Image: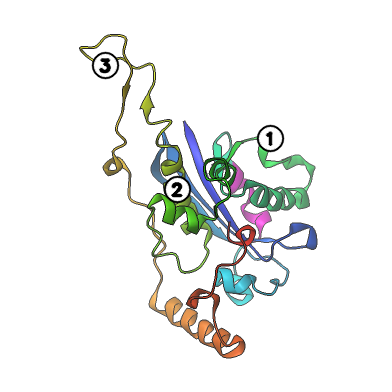
Amino acid sequence: MRQIILDTETTGLEWKKGNRVVEIGCVEYLERRPSGNHFHRYLKPDCEFEPGAQEVTGLTLEFLADKPTFAEVAEEFLAFIDGAELIIHNAAFDLGFLDNELSLLGDQYGRITDRCSVIDTLKMARERFPGQRNSLDALCKRLGVDNAHRQLHGGLLDAQILGDVYIALTSGQEEIGFGSVDEGRPGTAHAQVFDTSRLLPRPRVVVTASELEAHEARLAKLRKKAGRAIWDGEPEMAEAASA
């Protein structure tokens, strides 16, 4: 079974208002374990960020100015996800943006669901934890998934974390060997313990010293302008924005 954990970052919350995708992060899972393959691209949006969007992602138009457009990576992206089962948190958000990007290139590409099936982990979480916060950060805390390195939203980083969340959400289901036969006890089913040591290490995005310096300078400007930064201890943004 081939699964792709997918996340996007955008210039705002609604594609219908002209917002665009600025980052795509995909992590490939084979038989519910990371294969080591991933797809990650920053994209030039050719539009402005909505107020607050840059603070969430840390991305700027200056940083994205020399990056490819979606049109330049569309074929490579579609080839990577083609035929896979997509795992997305708040799938309607990401699919809406991706389908819009495809539609801007012409009708020949169709929709993402024409080539992939989709599992929405936000829907799964709401069914399992009704009435509770089910943002990615909230699920990490509830399920014991390490996200200490997540200071800003990022497509590839969030996809990596979502992979761990998905496995934690479903480990009580797919990891049970229904129908398998235990040696010495013919005809009986037995549970297979999920061995996390068999997981491959997550691919990491390594931040260079110059990038870190530029990032800190950007944060200093934001704090000076706004008086604070949301990640310095203020409450989280609405769940729809943080999904």
Mark 1, mark 3: which one is toward the viewer? 3
Direction front: furthest residue: 131
Q: In the image shown, does 66 or 126 lie closer to the viewer? A: 126
Magenta segment includes 73: yes
In the rendered structure, the answer to whether residue 205 lies left or right of residue 96 reads left
Q: Which residues are magenta?
A: 69-78
Circle 1 crowding by C-alpha within 10 Å: few under 14, some 14–19, many from 20? few
Amino acid identity at mark 1: Asp
Q: What secondary structure characterizes most of the magenta part?
A: helix
Amino acid type at circle 3 is Asp
Where is residue 30 shown, x and y percent of the image?
Answer: 42, 36
Asked which secondary structure carries label 1, the reply is helix
Instruction: Name the residue at 72% across, 68% down.
Output: 46
Disc 3 secondary structure class:
loop
Nearer-N-terminus badge (2/1) = 1
For the residues marked 1 and 3, what is the alpha-carbon distance in whole angstroms?
40 Å
Location of mark 2 (residue): 165
Sequence order check, earlier mark of 3 and 2: 2
Would residue 65 be visible to someone looking at this image?
A: no
Q: Is residue 231 above or below residue 176?
A: below
Q: Nearer the viewer, residue 214 or 131?
A: 131
